[in-house]
């Protein structure tokens, strides 16, 4: 579904990502761990095509097509959707209006869909204005529910969410990825996702297939998500950096 090869990215001349290589198979949920400032959000923004992230070298392939230089609207039409960590307030635009634009070619009952994640009362409010952290996350998920992308980019879905909202956010994400109430790991209807997490709490709700650790703008390692999370909790990210340095010296 997604293949990234030796990706280097700058913002205003400052390097953020260095030779990042990773892939997400069709129907696979991949976790991206990393400390603050590691470049995780920059990677998702680059995949989505935000213009201030300049690819200086490397390639991004989506569904086998090179999208390295594709505009953001083309990537969205191809089936990439994003949940931003801190989406902006959009004064003067009602959530309902945005959803109606997004759902023009789909048969959807917006009120019913919004009600399923307790967002019906927000439909006629300006987008994100006065919303709590959990309400913003649910607003983002409602928009993704309407878009129905093939590939989800989820930037820290736990951030700013209380335990009650987290249960709803987690179950909604699982339902979106599964494209139904439940699905097996090899279900052909299962969507693909790349999920950033600091705490690993989202793993209580998702059956993730693989994980990468990103530190200092580079991929340190990959492996089983729960095993890597356990190592991070006991050893910290500094150990990942030392391990990568030792391997590089041996090679």
Image (cartoon, rainbow, N blue to C red):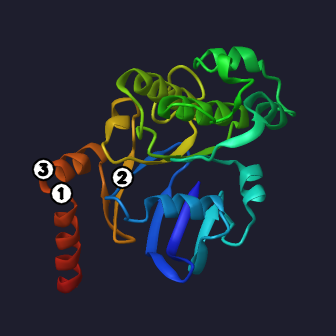
Q: Earlier in the sequence, mark 3 or mark 2?
A: 2
Residue 112: image quadrant is: top right
Task: Report how many numbered discs are placed on residues in the image.
Answer: 3
* CB contact under 8 Å: marks 1 and 3: yes
Q: Residue at x 39, y 44 (%)?
A: 209
Residue 189 makes an appearance in the image: no
Counting other residues with Cα less than 10 Å from the Cα at mark 1, is it few (<14), some (14-19), or many (20 or more)?
A: some
Quarter the N terminus occupies: bottom right
- Residue 100 appears at what percent x and percent y? 82, 31
In this rendering, the answer to whether 115 lies above or below 103 is above
SS for callout 3: helix
In this rendering, the answer to whether 109 lies above or below 88 is above
SS for callout 2: strand
Q: Earlier in the sequence, mark 1 or mark 2?
A: 2
Q: Which residue is mark 2?
A: 211
- Residue 25 appears at what percent x and percent y? 52, 52
Q: Residue at x 24, y 81 (%)?
A: 248
Q: Is residue 97 left or right of residue 169?
A: right
Counting other residues with Cα less than 10 Å from the Cα at mark 2, is it few (<14), some (14-19), or many (20 or more)?
A: many
Q: Is residue 141 left or right of residue 85?
A: right
Residue 176: image quadrant is: top right
* CB contact under 8 Å: marks 3 and 2: no
Counting other residues with Cα less than 10 Å from the Cα at mark 3, is it few (<14), some (14-19), or many (20 or more)?
A: few
Front label number (3 vs 2): 3
Between 91 and 220, the one lying in front of the other is: 91
Between 107 and 155, the one lying in front of the other is: 155
In this rendering, the answer to whether 249 lies above or below 147 is below
**Disc ID at residue 236:** 1
SS for callout 1: loop
In this rendering, the answer to whether 22 lies above or below 179 is below
């Amino acid at each position: 579904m997604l293949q990234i090869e030796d990706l280097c990215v700058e913002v205003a001349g400052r390097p953020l990502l260095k030779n990042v290589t990773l892939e997400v198979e069709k129907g696979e949920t991949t976790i991206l761990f990393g400390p603050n400032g590691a470049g995780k959000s920059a990677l998702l923004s680059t995949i989505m095509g935000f213009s201030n992230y300049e690819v200086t070298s490397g390639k991004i392939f989506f569904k086998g097509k090179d999208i390295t230089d594709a505009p953001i609207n083309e990537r969205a039409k191809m089936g990439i959707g994003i949940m931003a960590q801190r989406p902006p307030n959009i004064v003067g635009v009602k959530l309902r209006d945005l959803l109606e634009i997004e759902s023009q070619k789909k048969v959807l009952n917006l009120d019913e869909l919004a009600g399923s994640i307790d967002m019906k009362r927000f439909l006629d409010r300006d987008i994100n204005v006065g919303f709590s952290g959990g309400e913003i996350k649910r607003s983002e998920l409602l928009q993704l529910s309407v878009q129905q992308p093939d590939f989800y980019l989820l930037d820290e879905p736990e951030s700013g969410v209380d335990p009650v909202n987290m249960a709803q956010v987690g179950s909604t994400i699982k339902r979106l990825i599964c494209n139904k109430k439940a699905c097996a790991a090899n279900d052909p209807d299962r969507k693909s996702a790349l999920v950033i997490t600091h705490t690993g709490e989202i793993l209580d709700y998702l059956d993730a297939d693989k994980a990468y650790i990103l530190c200092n703008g580079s991929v340190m390692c990959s492996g089983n998500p729960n095993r890597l999370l356990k190592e991070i909790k006991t050893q910290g990210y500094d150990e990942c950096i030392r391990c990568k340095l030792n391997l590089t010296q041996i090679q």
